[in-house]
Image (tube, helix red, strand yellow):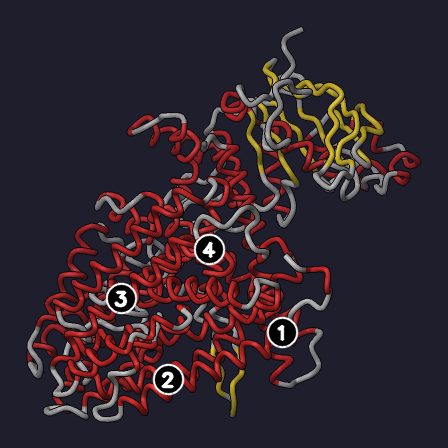
Amino acid sequence: MHLPDGFLDAPTALAAAALATAGLAVGLRGVRRTLPPHRVPLLGTAAAFVFAAQMLNFPVAAGTSGHLVGATLATVLLGPFAAVVALTCVVVLQALLFQDGGVTALGANVLNMAVVAPAVAAAVHGGVARALGGGPRARLAATGFAAWCSTVAAAVACAGELAAAGTAAWGAVLPAMAGVHMLVGLGEGVATTLVVAAVGRLRPELVAPVAGPRTPATGPTVAGGLVVALVFAVFVAPAACGWPDGLEHVADALGFSRAARAPALAAPWGDYLVPGLGGGAAATAAAGALGAVVAFVVASVVAWRVAPRAPGRAP
Amino acid sequence: MSVPALEVTRLSYRWPDGSVALDDVSFTVAPGERVGLVGPNGAGKSTLLLHLNGLLPEPLPAASAVKVFGTPVTAANAAAVRADVGLLFQDADDQLFCPTVGEDVAYGPRQRGVRGDALAARVAAELARVGLADAADRPPHRLSAGEKRRACLAGVLACDARLLALDEPTSALDPRSRRALRDLLLALPVACLVASHDLEFVVEVCPRVLVLDRGGVVACGPTREVLDDAATMEAHGLERPHILRHPHPHAG
Amino acid sequence: MSPRAPGAPGRRRVPAGPALALAVATVVVVVALPRGAWLVYALVGAAVLGAAAVARVRPRDVARRLVVAAPFVAGVAGLAFLQRGGAVVAGTLVAKSAVCVLAMAALTAATPFADLLDVLRRLRVPALLVTTLGLTERYLAVIGAEVARLRRARRARTFARSRRAAWTSAAGVAAHLFVRTTVRAERIHAAMTARGAR
């Protein structure tokens, strides 16, 4: 999903860079406010950990294998603000040291993978975990589903930038990117859940819900996720104008008002998939919804199997 | 007699889970003296070293059983004490956290306000002292284990440490690096507390030794006498060092 | 894990500020070029190739980076064929991204990472971010080596070859790695404190 140089035009690259900078500023401010000083080195080592975790192979089929992206893993293990900073470092180093992602596209890559992905992951994880009761199993199921949502959201963001830059047609690039990453996201979800469950077995305190009366970060996090999603919708909307039926579908989508549903389900991607294929909006929406249901079921089944069995482990 | 470099008086420490880490430990180290600290795994050696510059207990108490050059290790004195005590960690990679060796050596002095040419001169001098004069621009992960150890030493010496606390300084060193480290320590005019399983190294470097087991001091005295006592050594999971069993004609 | 060794013997060292400025300027110019300007791409490409040769970029490193990016580039370039003039768009994407990768590879080969960090610091990038970038780069090799050891240890006592076992095993390695990472971060903090950090 790393955009190389030459794929975005100047306005898109600059707009994405501005949004990324804003997101990063929120992350840095949150870290300064909430992270105790003795945890600051963890930002760097955790970023190196994400790099290293991306080296692990998860065999898929016929000799091919995938690897973790790690955005949701970082969010669940470090908290959203620290995750934004750590993931930004990962993306910047990938561009600077390994030419994985371009420098002019750095803003867009940071936005997709280090701002949108953890913001969506945090919002979905928090919302779903609470909706399911907040127990260990609920948190694991929320982890898997959040990983799927954040992967798809990052891909949709990437598709939006490509469309805005005129590199590819929205109607083609959205289903392609979203479709591929709905599959990739399933793997990411399962892998992330397995890792979080394994960390929980080794050191339960690292994945336990933060003690005390309501995490101070939860409210702003959910709000932040929603804001990012909204800003993104506004940012993507103009891109859709270039194609005959784009704008009205976006209008349709915004009028759709899925916000009435559970926020976790609606916010990250619901709006985006609808204006997809010309004339096939309903089909695309249905595909997206089906994908989400499948992802949720997979996440729940995996969580059921790997969650600690001890009944006394309630938070 | 002058103020001791280190004075530990009846120091006890329990881990947060309640298990005893240090139990009524008392000893002193004179300025410039080198003392070995030996004992089986889990005896409390590393825990003791962490107490020397106030990394334990957490938070620091108002009164302390540990005095460094006469200053008790309390919250109020922590900054001053940390300048006096150079702590060499077991894993050199934990200690070399800067992108280059030169920046790493500069870290301590910079925290204390040294800047510009004075800082550059300081870094060059410390690197030269440990034999790494040409390594300032190298990233730490390109150093050998022995070079890493010496870079760490330069880093703590640059803080003007007058007391060095070394945790397993010879682990992962090949014989040549080990020899270089030994010669370096013998030439330094600072007090040293060397925690190590490498008893040969302790015999060569430290005239006096302290045996720790289960958090308590079980023996203390001249290194060659204490470590030559087979009964004590075996009772505490140690072994008489080879060097004492067959004295080398030149080492006698 | 890190393929580059700037500052190592046999590599040339260039002042980082101008090098970064030059590389970024090159990339910006290439990106801003109009579509289908094949001759200009070729000229800039040749110049960058020269710079890369002077910086002694290893062709293998560049090739590997191009291969890593290939699926994405090919996918998007393929999509470009769906629009009018798609062949030109696709060709432009491939040419531009390749030239830019080469330019950045020349930069990383010629300038030590610590110097790049210095430039960022001078550009007023927040200190917390620069410090974290430095720590990330510093511990990449250390933690990468740890992954290799953990994987080997797992493989040494893994006999089942099922896919499920492979996933559980990889997840276990990642979990162990994360726990070690947090412990290491605590030790790094202790080392910083011991040398006077507040």
Task: Indicate the amino acid at tag 4.
Answer: Gly
Q: CA distance from mark 4 to mark 3?
A: 22 Å
Q: Position of residue C149 (x, y in %)?
A: 60, 65
Question: On what subunit does the disc labeled 2 rest?
Answer: A
Q: CA distance from mark 2 to mark 1?
A: 31 Å
- The residue that disc 2 covers is A288
Numbered tag placed on residue C188 in the rendering:
none
- The residue that disc 4 covers is A79
Q: Estimate how packed mark 3 is, as few (under 14), some (14 to 19) or many (20 or more) residues with alpha carbons within 10 Å.
A: some
* Label 4 with label 3: CB-CB less than 8 Å: no
Please identify, in this view, whether the residue under mark 3 or under mark 1 is nearer the observer. 3
Q: CA distance from mark 2 to mark 4?
A: 27 Å
Please identify, in this view, whether the residue under mark 4 or under mark 3 is nearer the observer. 3
Nearest the camera: C81 or A292? Answer: A292
- The residue that disc 1 covers is C169
Task: Indicate the amino acid at tag 3.
Answer: Leu
Picture quadrant of residue A167: bottom left
Nearest the camera: B29 or B246? Answer: B29
What SS does tag 4 mark? loop
Give above or below for C39 relative to C137. Answer: below
- Dot placed on the residue nearer the N-terminal end, 2 or 3: 3
